Structure formats: C-alpha cells, structure tokens
Amino acid sequence: MSKSTIDSADFAVQAAKIAIERNCSDVMVLDLKGISPAADYFVIATGTSDRQMRAIADEIQDLAKEHKNRRFGIAGYETGKWILLDYVDVVIHLMSEESRDYYALEMLWGDTKKLKIG
C-alpha cells in the first residue's frame, strides 16, 4: 500500500474536526511525540451516544482511506462506550461521558502540548 498522503498531525486535527462537526464535546489532540512509545498523537472526544460515535468512527475511517492511512486496529465499535481507532501514529478515542470521566486519559498526559484544532 502506498504512503499516506497526509501527515500524522494533519490527520489527527482533521479527525478532531470531524468529531467537533458531529457534536462531540471536549475534543482535543494531544501531542505525545517523544513522550509515549504508543503513538505520536491522541485524539480524544466525548460522544453523546453509541450511534453517534459509530458514525464518527466511520467518517474518520473514510478520511483515512481517502488519504491512504491504514488502520492498524479498532476496538469497542460494537458497544460504543469507548471506540478506539489505531492508526499507529494517531490513536483516536471516541468515548461516552462515563468512560471519559472514569479513565481520564488527558490527565495521564496532562503535561503534553495540545494541537490547535481550529
């Protein structure tokens, strides 16, 4: 498969914009380069329902395909409480309010830089 036509930071910001446009709250992009061995960027967003989060996940996957950005894995799509889309350099977390409050991912990475979305 050919190389992605978009860099990781741009992909993360565009995924965050999709979440914002689809009425997610508390959307953020954390810059984890040099901090986390897991990914360069985390996109974190709070959804309002499992149906909404699945629709957003589908749209982000369409964006990735458009830019030849191959997905490594997906988890939680069926239950819709916490959908994780793993694009290796970018990991997207679409979370219910309860999951977001409980796991508080942004608190784990509280001292990291956040990318400007808009």
Image: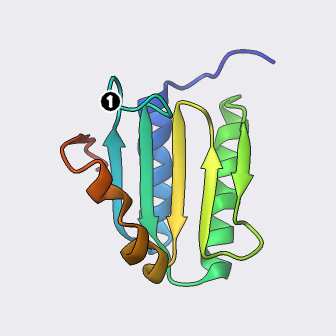
Q: Is residue 22 left or right of residue 83?
A: left
Residue at point 62% right, 63% down? 83
Q: Amino acid at mark 1?
A: Ile
Return the x and y of residue 47 as percentages of the image width and height. Answer: 50, 75
Q: Is residue 106 left or right of residue 54?
A: left
Residue at point 33% right, 23% down? 34
Q: Which residue is mark 1?
A: 35
Label total for image:
1
**Figure coloring:** rainbow
Q: Is residue 113 left or right of residue 91?
A: left
Q: Nearer the viewer, residue 109 or 31?
A: 109
Identify whether 52 is placed above or below 110: below
Identify whether 25 is placed above or below 75: below
Identify whether 2 is placed above or below 48: above
Return the x and y of residue 117 as percentages of the image width and height. Answer: 31, 48
Q: Residues within 10 Å of mark 1 (few under 14, many from 20)?
A: few
- Quarter of the image where one finds residue 6: top right
Residue found farthest to the top: 2
Q: Is residue 99 left or right of residue 75?
A: left
Label 1 secondary element = loop
Identify whether 28 is placed above or below 36: below
Residue found farthest to the left: 111
Q: Nearer the viewer, residue 49 or 14?
A: 49
Return the x and y of residue 82 as percentages of the image width and height. Answer: 58, 68
Return the x and y of residue 42 as percentages of the image width and height. Answer: 43, 45
**In which quadrant will I find the N terminus?**
top right
- Quarter of the image where one finds residue 104: bottom left
Residue at point 73% right, 66% down? 77
Residue at point 63% right, 50% down? 85
Q: Nearer the viewer, residue 27 or 77?
A: 77
